[in-house]
Image: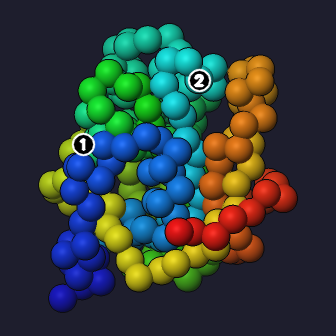
Amino acid sequence: MTATASLRANRLPAAWFARDALTVARELIGCALVHRRRAGIIVETEAYLGPDDLASHARFGPTARTSVMFGPGGISYVYLCYGVHQMFNIVTGEDGDGQAVLIRAIAPHAGLPADPAIGRGPGKVTTALLLDRAHDRRDLARGALFVASTELVPELASGPRIGVDYAGPWAARPYRFWWRDHPAVSATRSVSTRRKR
């Protein structure tokens, strides 16, 4: 049995994602993001809270690109950033909420070189796991792309999201979460910390 096959028994169901983005973003830290024979441990996330969140794509309402955000939780949302980087998000909440979590960084777990830099940043996450726009709107409750729970219990830190200065007061809110002191986390950190659970 491959390492990723053994994670299938711990696949998170759609109902797990049918919660608010802040809760899901925190609890995704330490979970495994799996695509076929590759897997990374999620070590950094950002929560986007819906139409009122001025940093979120949902602030414009449903569009051809963002309509997936207004659907049920547990669906992937992959978009192209600056015409270069594929960004992998997971829709959260209930129908109509417009919430999602960006996966900002992963640590290698299965099928990847043991290099903490390989998934350090959202563009590297998709490159490492061979994800692209073709993986948009995938149901994570079934298929070869999914999230699995693990036995890991990381210490969490939180701080402002990255690259959202245009969002006014929303830019300073501590909606980014990461595994404190983990080498696979992106370089920008903040001082606010808390333990998971």
Question: Which colour assignment does the render follow?
Answer: rainbow
Tell which of 3 and 47 is nearer to you: 47
Is residue 190 among what the camera can see?
yes
The residue lying furthest to the right in this view is 191
Q: Is residue 158 above or below residue 119?
A: above
Q: How many marks?
A: 2
Query: Percent position (x, y) of residue 117?
Result: 65, 68
Q: Residue at x 39, y 56 (%)?
A: 130
Q: Pointer 2: what residue? A: 53
Q: Residue at x 38, y 12 (%)?
A: 63
Question: Do residues under tags 1 and 2 come within 8 Å of each other at their CB atoms?
Answer: no
Q: Amino acid at mark 1?
A: Arg
The residue lying furthest to the bottom in this view is 1
Q: Pointer 1: what residue? A: 138
Instruction: Locate residue 180: give its quadrant.
Output: bottom right
Q: Secondary structure at mark 2?
A: loop
Name the quadrant of the N terminus.
bottom left
- On the picture, is 2 further left or further right than 49? left
Q: Residue at x 50, y 11 (%)?
A: 60
Instruction: Locate residue 139: give its quadrant.
Output: top left
- On the picture, is 117 further left or further right than 189? left
- CA gap between label 1 and label 2 equals 24 Å
Reading the chain from its start, which is encountered first: label 1 or label 2? 2
Q: Amino acid at mark 2?
A: Asp
Is residue 179 among what the camera can see?
no
Q: Secondary structure at mark 1?
A: loop
Query: Percent position (x, y) of residue 83?
Result: 56, 29
